[in-house]
Amino acid sequence: MAYLIGTAGHVDHGKTTLIAALTGIDADRLPEEKARGMTIDLGFAYIELPEIGRVSIVDVPGHERFIKNMLAGASGVDVALLCIAADEGVMPQTREHFQILYLLEARRVVVALTKCDLADGDSRALAELDVRDLLTGSPYAGAPILEVSAHTGDGLTDLKDALAKALASLGPREQTQSWFLPIDRVFTVAGHGTVVTGTLAAGTIKPGIEGELMPGSAKVRIRGIQTHGQQADHAEAGQRTALNVAGIRKEALHRGQAVGARGALFETTCVNVRLAPVADIKHGQRVRLHVGAGEFLGKLFLFDEAPGFGQIRLEGEIACAQGQRAVIRKYSPPTVLAGAEIVTPNAQTRRKSDKQIAGIAGGAGGSAAGLPERIMVELKRWPTGAETETICEALGQSPQALGVAFESLKQDGKALGFAGRWLDADQYKEFVERIRAATMTLHGQNPQAAAVSKNRVVAESGIEWQPKAFDRLTAKMAEDGQIELHRGDLRHPNYKISLNEKQAALLDRTLSVMKLHGAVAPSMQDLALEVCAPPQAVSEMIRLGVETKQIIKVEENLFYPVETLDELKRKLRSLPKTFTVAEFRDVTGSSRKYALPILQYFDETKITKRIGDERVVIG
Ligand SMILES: Nc1nc2c(ncn2[C@@H]2O[C@H](COP(=O)(O)OP(=O)(O)OP(=O)(O)O)[C@@H](O)[C@H]2O)c(=O)[nH]1
Ligand SMILES: [Mg+2]
């Protein structure tokens, strides 16, 4: 398990010095930082902790002018090391950083009361009271406070233990399938090419895989990975990670972009967010959205219909992931307005769209891990089934991102898809019943038809789907024996054509005469003469016989009663193992005119099989 510790605290409160004392690493890497004795941009280190192992550290600047850089490094922090100088106590950026950590959902806080060698007992006690006040009422109320001095080394061992304990108390990180890395630094290494660094925000990553860079939508290949300054065979979420990337020039890369697995990220200019306001927010106000390692300008709009949710329309393209945490600041002065969770990364700028609002509220549960559940919630809202695109839009996900979730729902039998149209299992059951009931009703309206047309079932059942989706649905029903397909028409399995007495008698007579003729089927005229009925009436009887499955059409104008064909099948058995049409003709006492179509029908129905000029019985 990989973890990230992030420093926080007011300028000059000893963050960088403390990290150096704990790890031996000077995180101030810029010449300007060394010259000014002040952190300007993010610094990185790592620490070995008992029973935890190696843990990444991000050191942030405390000066208010560099809050933007602090925000770039503060995402994904497992344990925040909040540094407060014992001789000064809580100061403005102590509060501001603390608020940001809370909004970005840092999981634990450990407070270091720094520079204790400079403060007497009273000042230390006063500072500690200050800190307790700050923590009270927050999720970090029970955070440990440790007195330390980077100069004398006092309290450092206890601090390490407290950090280890805080990390050990964390549950496993939420598992996500798709990796992505917000980029906070870009540089080149002689002989290696372009390197991007960041805190791996989700998933795991191995050398050799491909990723997508956003914004820019470029494909990149991960040539190599470094963590904690060493080559690594993989990196995990939470780790500071350096990726040696091929396929992209350094000039095309900058902080604020992100690289990730296909489908993990969205390139977007409009996001819907769940808001956690900490100040007054005005509808239409210009804001700074801090997501990943980037700061982006845009306008914030509030949804009247979905309180607690808003939309940010950005001034340019940004990269973000569904469920990602963000901070919103005022454009000027840049004070913190709210925390945010990206609920719809690729939102549409249609404020009043019902679909979108409901989708947002449905997505309030929030994380990528809950996608199947969120699809199920969404499906319930569409009594006639939802299109894949509708669900993607409502959840703010790409079809690729939802593919796995749909597949797992299908596997579990919770949802069914028919040519891009989805139903949950209960809806499907209801649809099956509606289609069966509609089919039965239509049978009743035309009792002598063997089947009813799909179009009429569509109209009768009110399931007005595209023909392709409806076909898939009825095909599945047929597979499960819930409906019968009859040359594209539908038939209820329990339906029996009802004939009146006269019809039944005429059909019986027709069948008897047909049977007498065996394989040598009479012409319609002859049959009519023998049955003593008009040819039209006999022809109608043959149609009814076919629909009731008592007569089989072997070819155009050639019909046999089922019993006659059964008899002919029996005759097949008296033939040699392989036999010719002539041999069949002779055994049935017919002529080629009848023998050949009958054998072809037997071939089709897998009773016989043709091998060259001969046949064998297979069925
Ligand atoms: N006496 C004493 N001085 C300290 C201690 N820790 C830090 N300092 C001094 O305080 C000053 C600021 O320390 P930094 O570590 O740069 O403070 P910082 O919080 O990283 O500052 P920014 O990154 O600019 O926000 C430096 O001159 C340090 O030498 C300490 O434990 N005791
Ligand atoms: Mg510093």
Image (cartoon, grey):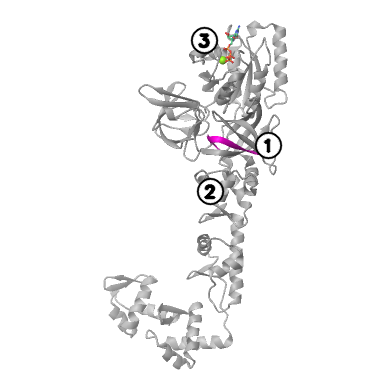
The alpha-carbon separation of the residues under discs 2 and 1 comes to 36 Å
Q: Residue 55 in magenta?
A: no
Against 372, residue 460 (above or below) is below
Q: In what element is the residue under mark 2?
A: helix
Which SS type dominates the magenta stretch?
strand
Q: Quadrant of residue 91?
A: top right
- Residue 485: percent from the left, percent from the top? 50, 68
**Magenta region, residue range:** 309-321
- Residue 426: percent from the left, percent from the top? 61, 56
- Amino acid, disc 1: His
- Amino acid, disc 3: Ala
Q: Which mark is residue 406?
A: 2
Residue located at (70% from left, 42% from top): 304
Can see residue 367?
no
Of residues 304 and 566, the one nearer the viewer is: 304
Q: Which residue is mark 3?
A: 35
Residue located at (43% from left, 86% from top): 515
